[in-house]
Amino acid sequence: MATGIGEKMFEGYLILDWKTGKMAVKSRKPKLVGPYKIPIKVELRVTIPDRQELSVRGEVEVAQSKVKDIIFESI
């Protein structure tokens, strides 16, 4: 789970109108939905990071035989 200075959950409904191609966001499920409208429940967890600069870490492992090939090609 991500850590940060703040985290908040947002819940609501994305209403897609299949006929017109428009969409809207509502905090509550509408009581009446037209025949072309599709309500989709949405739950979003938003985390604000501790700092503005984000970083990515990882490792790359190169086989010893590949290192030898690279060294020989550079000679």
Image (cartoon, helix red, strand yellow):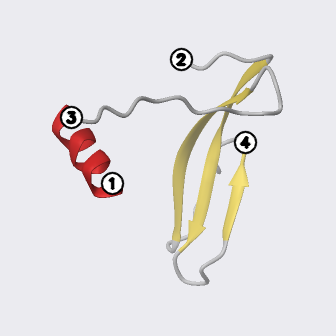
**For the residues carrying marks 2 and 1, which lies nearer the camera in this image?**
1
- Disc 3 to disc 2, C-alpha distance: 32 Å
Q: Which residue occupies 54% across, 55% down?
A: 39
Residue 2, quarter of the rendered image: top right
Q: How far across and how far down the image is residue 30, in percent?
A: 65, 51
Residue identifier under label 3: 63
Q: Earlier in the sequence, mark 4 or mark 1?
A: 4
Residue 53, quarter of the rendered image: top right
Do the residues under discs 2 and 1 have CB atoms within 8 angstroms?
no
Q: Which residue occupies 27% across, 40% down?
A: 67
> Residue placed farthest to the bottom in the image?
20
Q: Is residue 58 left or right of residue 27?
A: left
Which residue occupies the foreground of this view, 37 or 24? 24
Q: Is residue 16 left or right of residue 52?
A: left
**For the residues carrying marks 3 and 1, which lies nearer the camera in this image?**
1
Q: Amino acid at mark 3?
A: Ala
Q: Amino acid at mark 4?
A: Ser
Q: In the displayed structure, would residue 4 be above or below residue 18?
A: above
Q: Could one spot residue 31 in this view of the protein? A: no
Residue identifier under label 1: 75
Q: SS for tag 3?
A: loop
User: Tag on residue 27?
Assistant: 4
Q: How far across and how far down the image is residue 61, in percent?
A: 31, 31
Q: Residues within 10 Å of mark 4 (few under 14, many from 20)?
A: few
Q: SS for tag 2?
A: loop
